[in-house]
Amino acid sequence: MVKARSAPDMYLLGSTLLLLVIGVIMVYSASAVLAFREFGDAFYYLKRQALFAALGVIAMFFMMNTDYWIWKRYAKPALIVCFVLLVAVLIPGIGVVRGGARSWLGIGSFGIQPSEFMKMGMIIYLSKWLSEQKNPITAFTKGLLPPLALVGLAFGIIMLQPDLGTGAVLVGATLLIIYTAGARLQHLSYLGLIGVAGFIGLVIAAPYRLKRITAFLDPWQDPLGAGYQAIQSLYAIGPGGLVGLGLGMSRQKYSYLPEPQTDFIFSIIAEELGFIGGSCVLILFMVLVWRGMRTAITAPDTFGSLLATGIVGMIAVQVIINIGVVIGMFPVTGITLPLISAGGSSLTLMLTSIGILLNISRYSR
């Protein structure tokens, strides 16, 4: 390997830290009322966010200074552990149900979501596999189908929880890796049609998903039921205008918008900081994705390039889905906004992933 640069990509690092600071501030602003009502402590979610953000920053800087190719060695055992955790979460008495999905492992308020670890585990393993495999990815049967089957298995287990949002991010990020590795667009297009048919089947199989689709198309058909979150989100964004109502001045966080500190935190940002504040957040994400893709393009080897592509893809897909839901472009999926939404292990894992990306940037050509 070539000698590491003296510093990582500072644009990538700077945009990450700025988004994290904005997230900590906005989590407090969005959650203070809810936290005081539920726990008698307006700083409850702020303290949790600050704790996990601090742990995540430590992990990010550690990974930034750890050679990324070491992950090749642990790719297979890490993926096996991720699969074991995914299966364990489905066992009654072990998995914890939150938000209608059995997708958590933990005790009390502390828990981890194995599907979050699976996203990163799959990205690392596919990057290693596709950078080393002997059969060309352009060969449909021996090259393309095996990695797709592995991704499909993980997606299927996640859907048993069920957690369509996380599954969609997993599929989106891994397909980007597979395409970058050289898969033929024609093959992916055919498989995409099959995926659409499968998605329709999943929607039909679960009535609550069908309600979300109909609520997405016309939320005012059921304003107090399936369309409630979408309507309240728009009610938050609309009054924000150009400059917003002011930091801490949101009205929708007063028990109108459910979980304003997680899935719909961008609604609170738009309400309090307006179009300008929301645009600044989007610009920071664009900088992060731009510098991440630049890192992928200039990585010194195929493994590093695919790994960087997968990490950036994971972030970008999650941002697109979350903000798409908030502004009414997509049905409600339960996906958080990276680095901004309140989170525990998911926030720490996201920062850890960015730390790996920063390390790859130190070897850019």
Image (tube, rainbow, N blue to C red):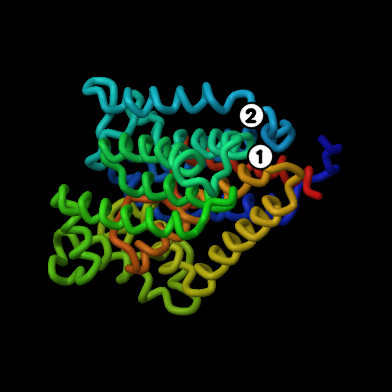
| In front of the other: 269 or 6 | 6
- Badge 2 is on which residue? 72
Can residue 226 be seen in this snapshot? yes
163 vs 327, nearest the viewer: 163
Q: Is residue 276 above or below residue 30?
A: below
Q: Is residue 324 left or right of residue 68?
A: left
- In this picture, residue 64 sits left or right of residue 203: right
Give the number of marks: 2
| 41 sits left or right of 305 in the view | left
Can the viewer see residue 351?
no
Expressed as whole percent of the image width and height from the top left, the position of residue 126 reads 54, 37
The answer to whether the residue labelled 2 contacts the one labelled 1, judged by CB atoms less than 8 Å apart, is yes
Q: Which mark is residue 280?
A: none
Q: Residue at x 25, y 36 (%)?
A: 160
Q: Amino acid at mark 1?
A: Phe
Residue 235 rendering spot, x and y as whole percentages: 30, 71
Q: Quadrant of the N terminus?
A: top right
Q: Position of residue 234 (x, y in %)?
A: 32, 70
Q: Secondary structure at mark 2?
A: helix
For disc 1, the marked residue is: 303
